[in-house]
């Protein structure tokens, strides 16, 4: 089987991930940070180890600035809903996933002003356009680091400098880059970094979170969920310190045990090595697809300017049919359609039909790229 749906979720997981989860369930089991007995202490240690691994990967100044939640979607909702008030202005791009767009549109209905800066049909963003969108009431710039549709990287470091010049906060959705492309929250002036555990961090679903930078100190961001934290139990108010302020309720400690194992695997292998491997596969896929008559590759056509996610269309065959036939006739798993990002497809000119999307992970091989190209060639030939 050829699994090329890593942009949706990575699979298989590295050795050690399932084992860490089974170990937690069978040998630890207790609620972290709640009780004083040794199993609870061990559970807390495991959750803290996951915090340390996230901080190491993204260069966060302190593991306690890593807050965990169920997903990057939840993390984006926390940041957007926690920060933006009626009358505030926020800036985003036209390449965003609905995890960003839907909370922003809901906030817009509640009185937040929103500017969606248009990107090029290749998915690139001119940071000068972001600077030009700043208003006196601007509070936040919120962007994905790379498009989940075409993989195009957005200039977050340049936008980070613009945000600092105007004293704005920068929120980055690193769902598509975390673990697959270098991300440094300090060097890139990222105030809030939303991450997901189940893609290129190689952890399980149900894990993710938000790294909260020092410019957020002073409780400007309200929690999304309030509840028990195991700390300050004598008070009926949510604790004001990190990470407890944003972590009401028992965490997914089983998932975090698996996430830590996935992260250790990424850190051992090295993001630079993973990136180099995936960039090589991506360059060959783009080149091969571009040479198939009837196939249109979307995006920059430049593996250096994108992640290992490639979108394309086949003349005469709907994306849904391509996906079905790749699965049934070629044993190839990919994703087709709008990929939860209608704004990106409107930007690229592929709305409403969408595209076929291949996403590589660290496991994929050059031989699999050739097999994928052969499969697309066969379909395209029949479509002509
Ligand atoms: C750029 C981007 N943002 C957000 C998400 C949402 O991720 P999750 O469903 O894990 O919260 C995805 C997942 O596809 C994504 O690619």
Image: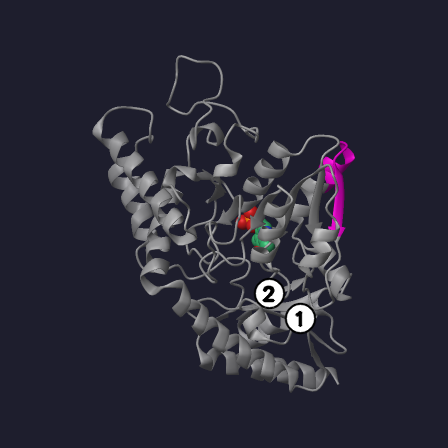
Which residue is more in the foreground, 270 or 349? 270
Q: Which residues are magenta?
A: 105-116
Q: Is residue 280 visible?
A: yes
Locate residue 186, reporting x and y percent. Answer: 46, 49
Locate residue 344, reporting x and y percent. Answer: 71, 59
Reading the image, the residue beneath label 1 is 299
Q: Is residue 1 visible?
A: no
Residue 376 higher or lower than 75, as above or below: below
Locate residue 160, reporting x and y percent. Answer: 58, 51
Contact, mark 2 vs mark 1 (Cβ under 8 Å): yes
Query: Residue 151, labelled with which disc?
Result: 2
Asked if the stretch drawn in magenta spans residue 1, the answer is no
Query: Residue, x 48% and y 42% (percent of image)?
Result: 209
Residue occupying the far left of the picture: 38
Answer with the quarter of the image where residue 328 lies.
bottom right
Q: How many marks?
A: 2
Near mark 2 (Cα within 10 A), the count class, few <14, some 14-19 or many ≥20, is many
Query: Residue, x 43% and y 38% (percent of image)?
Result: 65
* Distance from the alpha carbon under mark 2 to that under mark 1: 8 Å
Q: Quadrant of the C terminus?
A: bottom right
Locate residue 50, reporting x and y percent. Answer: 35, 45
């Amino acid at each position: 089987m050829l699994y090329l749906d890593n942009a949706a979720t990575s699979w298989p997981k590295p050795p050690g991930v399932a084992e860490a989860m089974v170990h937690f369930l069978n040998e630890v089991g207790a609620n972290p940070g709640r009780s004083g007995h040794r199993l609870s202490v061990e559970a807390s240690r495991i959750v803290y180890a996951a915090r340390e691994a996230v901080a190491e990967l993204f260069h966060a100044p302190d593991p306690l600035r890593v807050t965990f939640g169920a997903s990057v979607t939840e993390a984006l909702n926390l940041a957007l809903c926690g920060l933006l008030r009626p009358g505030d202005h926020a800036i985003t791009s036209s390449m965003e996933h609905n995890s960003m767009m839907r909370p922003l549109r809901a906030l817009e209905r509640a009185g937040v002003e929103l500017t969606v800066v248009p990107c090029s049909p290749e998915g690139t963003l001119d940071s000068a356009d972001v600077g030009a969108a700043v208003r006196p009431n601007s509070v936040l710039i919120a962007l994905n680091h790379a498009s989940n549709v075409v993989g195009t990287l957005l200039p977050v470091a340049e936008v980070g400098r613009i945000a600092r010049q105007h004293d704005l906060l920068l929120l980055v959705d690193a769902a598509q880059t975390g673990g697959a492309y270098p991300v440094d929250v300090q060097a890139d002036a990222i105030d809030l970094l939303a991450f997901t555990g189940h893609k290129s961090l190689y952890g399980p679903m149900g894990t993710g979170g938000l790294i909260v930078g020092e410019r957020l100190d002073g409780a400007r961001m309200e929690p999304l969920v309030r509840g028990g934290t195991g700390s300050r139990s004598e008070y009926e108010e949510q604790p004001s310190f990190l990470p407890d302020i944003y972590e009401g309720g028992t965490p997914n400690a089983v998932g975090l045990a698996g996430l830590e194992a996935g992260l250790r695997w990424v850190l051992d292998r090295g993001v630079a090595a993973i990136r180099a491997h995936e960039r090589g596969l991506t360059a060959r896929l783009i080149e091969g697809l571009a040479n198939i008559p009837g196939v249109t590759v979307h995006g920059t056509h430049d593996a250096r300017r994108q992640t290992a996610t490639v979108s394309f269309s086949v003349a005469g065959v709907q994306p849904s049919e391509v996906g079905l036939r790749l699965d049934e006739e070629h044993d190839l798993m990919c994703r087709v359609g709008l990929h939860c990002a209608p704004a990106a497809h409107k930007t690229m000119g592929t709305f409403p039909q969408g595209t076929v999307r291949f996403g590589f992970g660290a496991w994929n091989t050059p031989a699999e790229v050739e097999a994928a190209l052969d499969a697309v060639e066969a379909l395209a030939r029949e479509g002509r």
